[in-house]
Image: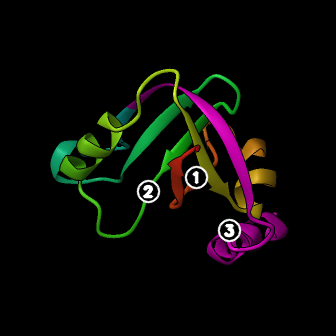
Amino acid sequence: MSLFIALVIMSPWLETKDVQSWRCTIEWAEPITTSGGRSSGSSAVAVHTENCGTILLNGPGATYDTYEKTAANFSPGTDWIFEIGWFSQHISPLIPNLAPSTKTYYPAS
């Protein structure tokens, strides 16, 4: 249990290690708020893909309104590159209801 807690505490640092580029085909994207509605809680964009599962986009200082605009940028059938760190690659799949997350993403060329 203490190893798991240590991994979670170190997750921001672990996300900077072994970063891999995932090329994913978009199904749809939606802004989400984990609790408290629009005025409070944690917000992100859930990007649902055909070949990579769901990926969460999040970052400091973002608001629900900016996430709505971000989600609108993902058109179904387009390919995007998501930079996924070590924690999201190896630990997130082991935790129920936790999707890989990223702050770096761009359209595939």
**Label 2, label 3: how many angstroms apart (C-alpha)?**
13 Å
Residue identified by numbered label 1: 101
Residue identified by numbered label 3: 15
Q: Is residue 24 shown above or below 17?
A: above
The percent coordinates of residue 1 (x first, y second) are 81, 63
Which of the pair 33/53 is nearer the observer?
A: 53
Which of the pair 68/96 is nearer the observer?
A: 68
Bounds of the magenta segment: 1-29
| Disc 1 + disc 2, Cβ < 8 Å | yes
* Residue pictured at 18% horizontal, 48% vertical: 65
The percent coordinates of residue 31 (x first, y second) are 33, 38
Structural crowding at the residue carrying mark 3, measured as other residues with C-alpha within 10 Å and reported as few (<14), some (14–19) or many (≥20):
some
| Disc 1 + disc 3, Cβ < 8 Å | yes
Q: Amino acid at mark 1?
A: Ser
Q: Earlier in the sequence, mark 1 or mark 2?
A: 2
**Label 1, label 2: how many angstroms apart (C-alpha)?**
7 Å
